Structures are given as C-alpha cells and as structure tokens.
Image: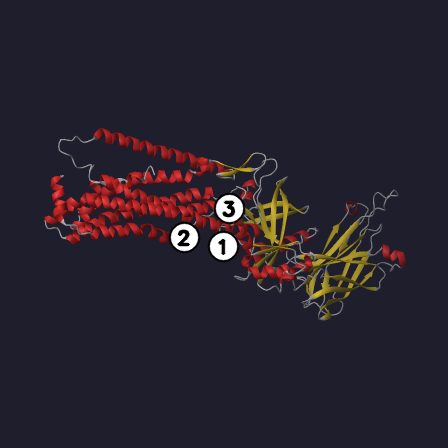
Amino acid sequence: MLLTGPTLLARGTAGTHDPDRRAIGRPRPTRRRATVTVLRGGVDLALVVLAVVAYAQLAGRRSEGTGALAPSGAGGVLGIDPLLVAAPALALLAGTVLVLRLLPLAARLGERYAARRRGLAGALAGWQLARRPQRAARPALLLVLAVATGVLAVGQGASWDRSQDDQADFRTGADLTVSGSAPSPLAQGGLFDDVPGITRAAPVVRTTVTTDGSREARLLATDTAAAADGVLRLRDDLAGRPLPRLLRPLAGKGAGRRAGLRLPPGTDRLALRLRLDGPGRARGPAAARSGLALAVTVTDRFGVPYRLPLGDIPADGRTHTLTARLTDGGGSPAGPLRLTRIGVSHHVPRHDAGRRLTVEALHAHGRFGHRTVHPATASRWTPRVRPDDASTASGGQYAVATARPARVRPRGAPVTLRWTTGSAPAPKPDGNDGPGTVSVEWKPHEAAAAPLAAVATDSYLRAGGSTVGDTVTVRVADTELDVRITGAVRALPTVTPRDSDDGQPDAGALLCDLGALDRALADRGADPLEPRTWWLSAESGGTARAAQALRDRPAVGTVRVRDEIVDALRSDPLGAGPRSALTALVPAAALLSATGFAVAAAGAARERAGDLAVLRALGAPRRRLARAVAAEQGLVVALSAALGLALGTVLTRLFVPLLVVTGEGRAPVPDLLVRLPPGPLAWLVAAALAVPLLVVAGTALRRPAPAPALRTEREG
C-alpha cells in the first residue's frame, strides 16, 4: 500500500502538480522534489538490501538441505524464519521499483524514435511519455506488480506440481513397486505375467558395495533392457543422454542370456537321472561317504540365475533321480527358463581319484505333463574348480582337484562330467579341522567376460575421483569385481543421498544390469543376488486397475503405487498451503492493478484535456488524437507487461527452487525443475491486461467538447 497508495489517490490531484508547468508567481518546489527523490532512493536501497540478505540466507539454508522451514531443536520441530518467508515479497517489491527506473530511459528512446517518423500519433505519444514519465510510472508500477506476481504464482504452481511427480517417480522408480511377496525369488517373476494392465516387469536388487577401502556406496541392479523400455522413471535432465543409450552397454553382448539348455514353457519341476562312478564303485556307507552334493542353476528371462540344490548322490554307479521344484507359494518363474550351470561339491579325500558324473536324462514337469529335454545343438561346457577350504589348495604333496571340459550332446546322455577329487590331509583327531571341500561347476563356454559395466552418480564420481570410462574395483557380497563406468547421472531413483555417520558426504551409487552382475559373481564362485523387489510398468490410465489386481492376489506382497504417492504429496498442507496462498494473491493483484490503472487513466485524461482541446482547435483530426492517446497508454501497458514477465521469470527461477520443500522441511529429491508453461502464462497476461486495455480503448474513444476544456485551460 505504501507503493500503490499514491496511484489510487492521484485522481484528486491530477493536473495540480504538473512538474513542467510553472505557476505564475509560485516558485518551483525544487527542495521538496529533491527530498522526495532522496527518500525514494533510500526506499529503493533498503528494499534491495533486504531482498539480497533474505535471498542469501535462503540460499544458505537450501545448501544445507533445508529452506525457510527447517527442523530445529532436539525434537525436530519445524521452525519458521519470517525474513526468509518474506524473501519473495521483498524481492518482488525491490525488483518492481528498480525495473521502473527503466521507464524514463525507455520513454526517451521512444521519443527519439517517434521524432524521426512523420505520424502525429507516435510523435505525440512519445513526447508525452518523455515529458511526464512519473505520471506513467504509477499505473506501470501496479501492472508490473500484478504480472510479476502472476508469473511467480504460475511458475511456483507448475514447478510444485512437477516436483511432486518427480518425487513420486524417485521414491517408486516405476509405475508400481512390489516387494515382500510370499514365493521364493525364483517363483516371483511369473506373478505379474497375467495381471491386467501390467506391460513389463523388472527385478530389482539394492545392496551396498565397498570401494576405496572403507567407503560404502549403494548398488542398484535391475534388468536394464526392461528399464530402458519404459519401466524405469528417470527424469530426462538427470542423465546426459537418452535412457536407452545410457543403459544399453550395461547388459553386455547378451551371450549369457542365450546360453544353456532351454526348458519348456510352464516348467515347475526338474528331474535329473544321474549316475556317479568312482574308483572301485563303493557300496553301502563307503559309497555315501564318497558321494557328492549336486546343484543346478536355472536362469530366467531377465538373465537372473538361481541356484537350486538337488541333494546328494552316492558314488555307487547306479542311476538315481534328483528333483528340484521351481514353483512355490502360489508363484511361478519368469519363463522361458534355461539350465545354465551344473555344479558338484564334495569332501576332499586323502588320495586323489577320478570321478565321472553322467546325466542320463533331464525331464521337465508342468501342466503339460513331462517332457525329456534335449539340447538343441552340441556345445562345449567349461569347468571351474573352486576349493572351499584353504587346506585343499595347500599344494606340496597333496594333489589339486582338476576338471575336464564337457561335451553336451543332442542325442543319448546329454552330458558326462569328469574331474579329479584332489587330496588333502586327514582330519585331526580332536575334530577341530574337518576335511576340506572342493566345488566344480560347468557352464556353457563363453568368451572372456569384459568388466562389469555400470552407471555412476555424480556424487560417486566426486567421492572416488573417477570419471566416465574409468575401471574401479568394488566389493560386492564379499567378492571383488572390476567395474567399468560407462555413464553418469545426477541421481538414481530409490537411492536417496545420505551423509555417513562420521560426517563424510554421500558416497553415491552405481546402477548395473542384474543378470550381468550375477554372472560376474557366479564366475567368481559367489552366490548370485536374488531379487525380492519388482518394478512394474502399467498401461496408460490402467495403474489403479493393475494395483487392485495385484492386491487381490494373496501371493503378492506390498504394492506401492506411484499415482497414490503423488496424491499424498499433493495433499500435504506444507506444500499445498503456500501454493494456494500465492494463487489467491493473483486475483487481488490484478484487481488492484486494474483499479489503479483506471484511476490513473482518468486523471491523465483530465490533465490532458486542455492540450488535446488546443490541438483539436488547431485542426488536428480527432482520429489521430485518439490514436495518440491509445498509443501513449498502450505503450505503458505493453512495456509494463514485458517488464512484469521478465521480472516474474527471474524471480521464479531464483526463488522457487529455494522455497519448495518436502513434508519434513527438506529439499526435494530430485532437485526441483522450474517450469513456466507458456499456455497458462498467456492466459495470465491476457487476464491481467484485459481491464487496462479496455480503459485505453475507452479513453481513446472519448469525445469531450473542446470549448469547456479551452476555457478551463485559459482560466488556469
């Protein structure tokens, strides 16, 4: 009101204090005018200083992860700093006053431009604005305030809405997230195949990795092919390139996804007919002691391997059938499945001996009944020997276990595995040191694997001093892996930045393909990481239907829906309240500016009535005079709208990222992205300028009689 009051009161004094009219016998009030100028400059300076201080304080709070609202005290109660809350209003007032300093300069430039033209309307409008710039500054002040306030409200509202969407995307990572389901991890992948509305699914594993000695970072692993095909919700500006290009290198060349023995669709149980031969074909307890434990690995369509123990088989030379169930708890695997590894484990005897395990037949059971699985083509499987105890690799007088490659045949017995047991010292009498064990595993022959590829967050690169293209060593599940960084992102969904307990900054995170990670772990003898969380993408508009269908299934665990999280965030009063208040302020500012402009226009018309009457008496056409009035006031409206748009845009980009906070008073993750939608801005400008333009038209079309105006001019 301090700034707008003079405008609203200007009608009663219009024409009585014309700065360019010198009353006869009345000295020009230069001392008073200088005093007002000094005071006005002091107000400008005070507003600017307060706005700069408030912005600096607000920016400092945001760098600490908070804002105008921040937890304070031991109880974490949100506290409010009035200066920081008022920062946008202070900046708006300071910016408006400073912007109006440009009006006299613009008026002089307009006068020079109009003077070079031959038309009366432009020249007269430019001369009037240059002659009395402060008269135009009053309505311009209100218009700039109204338009800038509207731009700030539109920008804050659109940016806040976008931030809620981004936060929900970041918390879920996909349209729906399912975790804690009842079936085993292998039997969870098929739970979503026939759910209405679900288009794709991706397994997810989250764990921690150790890098650079003791620094702990987070690891996010998923099926990157599905993630790049619309499952993963990652904001475009968080990555330096499109998501498909970013994730394409992570899965590798894909040979590991196609290798192995393909099982029929719908297989829920495997049965292997096996025969283990050893030296002398032991019988009874001796055969059991010389037996071994057998396990197979099946890989689902996501490339994730699952190790299935089959049980023990004695070395008696007889055929035995061992089975493994693939389904449980109402779930089913994500087919088609492939058998990709066969492994044996046994105690190391005192004397080295040869062993031979023959897989006579492989049967698949399911709703189709049972089928015998035959390899499609002949292939070569290579072994890997891993001592499970240090004593088995002690060397010296004891033999080390060895294994031979195996040939998988399309006909007859599918595969025969041969290896030597190695030898180890006998156990001590006190029983403290049991016999060592050794494991041998065969898998389809592949070329030497490249280092595991991963995408790193910027914080991971900063913490480790790495760049894209570097190869780093990380420890995953007590296994060291070489990881090649192929890309970088600002943040990864579901991985919230956090500082360590000792105050160190966030160590960042890595994103890799789950199948490639598990193959790398298995190649080093470690157990693969099994997913217990799933990301799901839904059809457009079908998220609610898919979520209800999932919740109706007893085997499905907790379902988190991205759209439900968005609704919860938007109903948070901490964010919705300021937005509603700022939106409600826009009509008030528009009404105030319309009223002020109408009052100022009426005063200007009364003040200029004499001048226009003189020009009309001298023969100036009425139409040209109307154009001059419309040009003068229209120029004020257009210039005010442009300055208001510019000021509102600058303030929106400066303050909105600092003001939007979460329900805990923290900065949103990911960072807020400022939006200024052109459609709502166009409607805003049209609404704010509707009344001023009508006033301009009405003033220009007025046809007052020149005689009364000339008499008033002569008597004055």
Counting every numbered tag in the picture gives 3
Q: In terms of depth relative to the viewer, which is nearer, 342 or 493?
A: 493
**Position of the N terminus by quadrant:** top left
Task: Tell me what residue is drawn at x 76 percent, y 49 percent.
Answer: 387
Of all residues shown, which one is farthest toward the top?
A: 31
Q: In terms of depth relative to the viewer, which is nearer, 152 or 267?
A: 152
Q: Position of residue 418 (x, y in %)?
A: 77, 59
Which residue does the numbered mark 1 point to in the structure image? 242
Label 2, residues with CA under 10 Å away: few <14, some 14-19, many ≥20:
few
Which residue does the numbered mark 3 point to in the structure image? 573
Vertical comparison of 688 with 279: above or below: above
Amino acid type indicated by mark 2: Pro
Q: Nearer the viewer, mark 3 or mark 2?
A: 3
Q: Position of residue 527 (x, y in %)?
A: 70, 52
Q: Position of residue 361 (x, y in %)?
A: 76, 67
Which residue does the numbered mark 2 point to in the structure image? 677
Q: Secondary structure at mark 1?
A: loop
First-in-chain label (1 vs 2): 1
Q: CA distance from mark 3 to mark 1?
A: 35 Å
Residue 390 found in image quarter = top right
Q: Nearer the viewer, mark 1 or mark 2?
A: 2
Q: Is residue 133 visible?
A: no
Residue 21 found in image quarter = top left
Q: Position of residue 486 (x, y in %)?
A: 55, 50
Q: CA distance from mark 3 to mark 2?
A: 24 Å
